[in-house]
């Protein structure tokens, strides 16, 4: 291996946490963010280049530079560029000795030669796996970023970035990797809460036979859940504003309807529930007369969502959640946030319960716009899905129920949920509030890394946390599916609008 520079002495280094090395300006193989190594008595010291400084003693003293420059440019008279040198500041990550990694306890020796990190060692050091999920390439190295499935997913994952930075692209990459896994490596099921119809591409091509897409808002083939499977606690969760008396009444009626169903197998729907409330004889005539109408008023909101049916059930989680398969819940045609929250809460709770009983395989639930489903500050009835997401975040790892929370507003995402996401993948973020929040909630993001988050380009990301032993900068790979999104480009919509209007005017003229 060819050395890239030499360790130097500065006022405070080399130390066990930081040191600098000087390198030739013509050396092209040294970049900020690159992993480097050098030998010491302890073993191979491993670190990354945190910053690069350029220096030239010729230009150190302002007054003489100004004086010379007045006469003629300094560089015309002196070989100034040959005095130029470049210093790289290295942050120490650890020391490797005979395949083990230790904390650095002896600083490297000034004068020691620096090398770019050995690829094998780098992989080992970062904790990458040959059969891991291929997210992309490690920046400045040819090493593939292959993350261990268990380490990445088991303790949940958050993808944090501003709008348009590539969150859905990255989660598409992740899903492709999960669907491509070999059976012997362990396959999990994937369920996506797709708010804007960004995962339609899975329905064509290589993954079509393993993908089911549900257009949630479709009247006939969209989401549906049979009334007879609804227990009172579910409605109480969706409608937290029910009073104690209303809950008691609802409880009685649902129990009654269900026990009748058990006897005669006659399915019942929302209408039956409402009718039964009207018919219900309250034994205690002193009970408030307002209970029935109040309960009905609240239930009518649920009825309008058209989620509960007599018989239809879609998705059927027991059949639709399979190892190596994908279930996409496409919410792009659902407008009401409350309705989305109710469905997400219903599905997440069901998934978690089925998984706890071992009736479905371990799964990853990908939630786009997670801040809308687990909001940090929310009114009671706006927080319907938060409690189940927080429950999975806290307890899911014991059962193989994993979350991937995606958000462009990390500040608004439940701190409980976010803090349980042990791996964070961060793409570009420029909003200072979000940046602060990310720095506080992501372990391993120091001020220097935080600074580089604002200048990430689309396709670049930083992985920190459980999935890796040290922060990694990655170039996210291309996706394999053909991208297909719901919704049409603005220009197309605009053109169509004008075409239609012209046509209407022509028609009107023709009529006159
Ligand atoms: N690694 C990448 N390589 C190539 N193109 C990418 C990459 N990441 C993202 N893009 C492109 O950048 C654009 C924005 O990406 P994407 O839709 O994933 O962003 P997003 O963060 O999900 O945005 P939104 O917040 O609007 O949902 C897309 O056109 C996508 O194809
Ligand atoms: Mg997106």
Image (cartoon, helix red, strand yellow):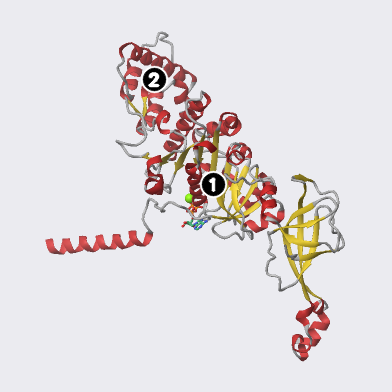
Disc 1 residue crowd, few under 14, some 14–19, many 20+, Cα 10 Å: many
Vertical position of residue 396 compared to residue 67: above or below? above
Residue 326 lies, in percent from the top left, at 44, 39
Q: Name the residue under label 2.
A: 292
Towards the viewer: 348 or 201: 201
Count of numbered labels shown in the rendering: 2
Towards the viewer: 146 or 283: 146
Q: Quadrant of residue 339?
A: top left
Mark seen at residue 407: 1
Residue 249 lies, in percent from the top left, at 42, 17
The residue at the far bottom in this view is 71
Q: Quadrant of residue 195?
A: top left
Which mark is in front, 2 or 1? 1
Residue 252 lies, in percent from the top left, at 42, 14
**Quadrant (top left/top right/bottom left/bottom right) for the C terminus:** bottom left
Q: Can residue 374 be seen in this view?
A: no
Under circle 2, the secondary element is helix
Residue 39 is left or right of residue 431, and the answer is right
Q: Residue at x 48, y 26 (%)?
A: 354
């Amino acid at each position: 291996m060819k050395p890239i520079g030499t360790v130097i002495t500065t006022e405070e280094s080399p130390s066990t946490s930081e040191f600098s090395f000087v390198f030739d300006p013509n050396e092209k193989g040294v970049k900020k963010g690159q992993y480097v190594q050098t030998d010491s008595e302890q073993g191979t010291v491993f670190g990354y280049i945190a910053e690069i400084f350029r220096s030239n003693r010729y230009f150190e003293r302002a007054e003489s530079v100004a004086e010379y420059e007045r006469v003629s440019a300094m560089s015309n008279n002196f070989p100034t560029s040959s005095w130029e040198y470049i210093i790289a500041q290295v942050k120490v990550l650890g020391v490797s000795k005979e395949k083990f990694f230790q904390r650095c306890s002896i600083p490297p020796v000034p004068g020691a030669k620096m090398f770019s990190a050995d690829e094998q060692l780098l992989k080992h050091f970062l904790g990458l796996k040959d059969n891991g999920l291929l997210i992309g390439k490690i920046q400045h190295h040819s090493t593939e970023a292959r993350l261990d499935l268990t380490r990445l997913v088991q303790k949940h994952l958050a993808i944090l970035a501003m709008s348009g930075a590539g969150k859905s692209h990255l989660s598409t990459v992740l899903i492709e990797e999960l669907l491509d896994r070999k059976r012997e490596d362990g396959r999990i099921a994937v369920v996506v809460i797709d708010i804007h119809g960004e995962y339609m591409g899975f329905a064509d091509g290589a993954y079509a036979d393993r993908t089911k897409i549900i257009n949630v808002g479709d009247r006939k083939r969209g989401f549906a859940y049979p009334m007879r499977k609804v227990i009172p606690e579910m409605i109480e969760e969706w409608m937290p504003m029910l009073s104690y008396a209303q809950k008691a009444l609802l409880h009685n009626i649902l129990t009654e309807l269900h026990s009748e169903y058990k006897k005669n197998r006659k399915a019942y729907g929302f209408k039956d529930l409402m009718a039964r409330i009207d018919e219900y004889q309250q034994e205690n005539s002193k009970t408030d007369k307002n209970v029935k109408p109040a309960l009905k008023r609240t239930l009518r909101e649920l009825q309008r969502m058209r989620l509960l049916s007599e018989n239809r059930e879609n998705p059927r989680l027991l059949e639709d959640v399979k190892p190596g398969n994908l279930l996409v819940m496409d919410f792009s045609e659902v407008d009401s946030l409350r309705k989305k929250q109710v469905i997400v809460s219903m599905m997440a709770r069901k998934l978690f319960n089925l998984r706890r009983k071992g009736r479905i395989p371990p799964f990853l639930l990908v939630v786009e716009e997670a801040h809308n489903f687990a909001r940090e500050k929310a009114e009671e009835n706006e927080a319907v899905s938060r409690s189940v997401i927080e429950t999975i975040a806290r307890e899911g790892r014991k059962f193989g129920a994993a979350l991937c929370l995606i958000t462009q507003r990390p500040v608004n995402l439940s701190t409980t949920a976010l803090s349980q996401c042990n791996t964070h993948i961060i793409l570009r973020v420029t909003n200072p509030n979000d940046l602060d929040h990310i720095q506080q909630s992501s372990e391993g993001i120091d001020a220097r890394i935080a600074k580089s988050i604002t200048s990430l380009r689309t396709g670049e990301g930083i992985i920190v946390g459980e999935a890796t032993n040290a922060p990694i900068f990655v170039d996210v790979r291309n996706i394999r599916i053909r991208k297909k999104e719901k919704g049409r480009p603005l220009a197309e919509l605009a053109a169509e609008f004008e075409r239609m209007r012209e046509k209407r005017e022509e028609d009107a003229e023709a009529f006159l």
